[in-house]
Image (spheres, rainbow, N blue to C red):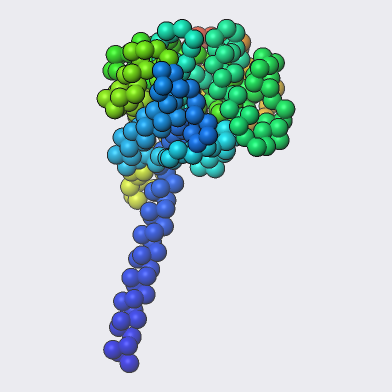
Amino acid sequence: MQTTLKPTIVFLSFLFISTLTSFTTLSAQEDKFVVVLDAGHGGHDSGNVGNGHSEKNIALKVTLEVGKELERNPDIKVIYTRKTDVFVELHERANIANRADADLFVSIHCNAHSSQASGTETFVLGEKNTGRNFEVAKKENEVIFLEDNYKENYAGFDPSSPESTIAIGIEQEVYVEQSIVLARKIEDNFINKAKRKSRGLKQASLLVIRNTYMPSVLVEVGFLTNNSEGSYLNTKAGQSKMASAIKTAILDYKKELDLNVGSHILHVDAESMVETKVEPRIIEGVIFKVQIAASSRELEAKSYNFKGLADISREQSGAVYKYYSGHTSDYNKARELQNEAKLSGYSGAFIVAYKGNNKIAVADALKTESN
């Protein structure tokens, strides 16, 4: 009897420990920063073939290189919309990112033009479709005609119509500011690290990032139609250089986000999980709010428009309306409100500070704290 019981206890103990380990692993995976990498075009959609180079192949090679480098970071999970030469519909690329509840969506492409135009461009979603920006949007969006059910999937959307392209930006607008932060980092890296010419950060109505519910950018790594740039992008060295610039920008963006959060949940000690009362940290003469969204739409500053968050206020900055939760001089209370906003789905929520009617840096506000 004892002989039979002992192995049974050992087996059950092992099973219990294994179960706990699998739950811990699952939890750690869920806490990772999720980046969805989208290699433009693929399969029967070749993209542009300037100077005989293949956009779909170059975009895939750069994307896989970015992913390989990011995967070295244990806190990052990389998901690809494609890893081989296959065709993926535009709406499905966004669906992949949304199902993964991704933190970032980065779509990688190569440019083309009838001239010897050159340089990188990084696009975020927007309505500025005049001139060349509209031509880029039109070119990238025309891929829908290669899909069997494009009329059903895109509800009569016409890539040739400026009116159609203006209408597609609404869903992603709340993430535009964060997308711009990443886009700027990418273009800065192209200039400073890859030593390439940059045409800057642009806004256009691009279908591939229309329905992504996270910060999203579309990167044009250069013009295949330019003789020297096309040749450069067709080399392994050129692809690695561009991939490294994009990878570093993503890591810098994540690092900045982690600093704004204030603590990294992956490394919380069991002892620190004991509930403690946080003492107020009042900063006289300063008001803290939590920015939760930015949009060109003027929404009523009511709780029901912002997932039940309280004390909503609105501020107009040019053509953009910024929305905030909270109004307090207690910095620790502001941090609680920030965490509440993140738990409600506003993953990019951050604290802002005001002195009088002027917005000031949070770091400067905290320096004014009296001893």
Point out the residue furthest to the bottom here: 1
In percent of the image, x 36 and y 12: which residue is there?
227
Tell me if residue 290 comes above or below residue 275 in the rendering: above
- Taking depth in this image into account, of 56 and 263 the one nearest to the observer is 56
Camera-nearest residue between 108 and 100:
108
Residue 199 visible somewhere in the drawing: yes
Q: Is residue 361 visible?
A: no
Against 23, residue 346 (above or below) is: above
The residue closer to the viewer here, 253 or 285, is 253
Q: Nearer the viewer, residue 15 or 249?
A: 249
Left or right of residue 367: residue 307: right
In this rendering, the answer to whether 309 lies above or below 193 is below
Q: Quadrant of the N terminus?
A: bottom left
* Residue 276 vertical placement versus 177 (above, below): below
**Which quadrant would residue 228 be assigned to in this image?**
top left
Residue 134, how many percent across, how many down?
58, 13
Residue that appears at 42% across and 53% down:
26
Name the residue located 68 percent from the left edge and 16 percent from the top edge: 161
What count of labels does the image hold?
Answer: 0
Q: Quadrant location of the C terminus?
A: top left
User: Residue 246, how many percent across, how many down?
Assistant: 36, 25
Which picture quadrant has residue 116?
top left
Which residue is most to the front? 52
Query: Picture coordinates of residue 323 (x, y %)?
Result: 59, 21
Give the x, y percent position of residue 359.
49, 12
Q: Residue at x 30, y 24 (%)?
A: 235
